Amino acid sequence: MLTAYPPLSGGGPLIARQLEDATYTLCVLTGTRQLDTTLFVARRQLADAMTQNGSPPR
């Protein structure tokens, strides 16, 4: 994730580890392996969930 979003790399080792953990978790939850695909799938799942609950997507 840090290589995909260089501005995030200045947060130090703790922030880097937290971002890597978040990236891994999101990949597992969406069943994907690449960050761009993961973000696409996650956004789609959120939009679908909001539509099913009657909330319009933002």
Image (spheres, grey):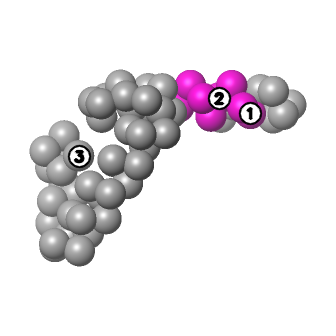
Residue 47's mark?
A: 2
Q: Residues within 10 Å of mark 3 (few under 14, many from 20)?
A: some
Label 1 amino acid? Answer: Met
Q: Earlier in the sequence, mark 3 or mark 2?
A: 3
For mark 1, what is the residue? 50
Which residue is under mark 3?
Answer: 1
For mark 2, does the 10 Å Cα neighbourhood hold few (<14), some (14 to 19), or many (20 or more) residues?
some
Q: Nearer the viewer, residue 56 or 15?
A: 15
- Determine the residue positioned at 26% across, 55% down: 20
Q: Residue at x 15, y 66 (%)?
A: 10
Going by the numbered disc 3, the residue's amino acid type is Met
**47 inside magenta stretch:** yes
Instruction: Estimate the spatial distance between the alpha carbons at disc 1 and disc 3, rounded to whole Å.
Output: 26 Å
Residue 24 x/y as whole percent: 33, 47
Highlighted range, magenta: 43-50
Position of residue 19 relative to residue 57, above or below, is below
- Judged by its main secondary structure, the magenta piece is helix
The quarter of the picture where residue 39 lies is top left
Occupied quadrant, residue 34:
top left
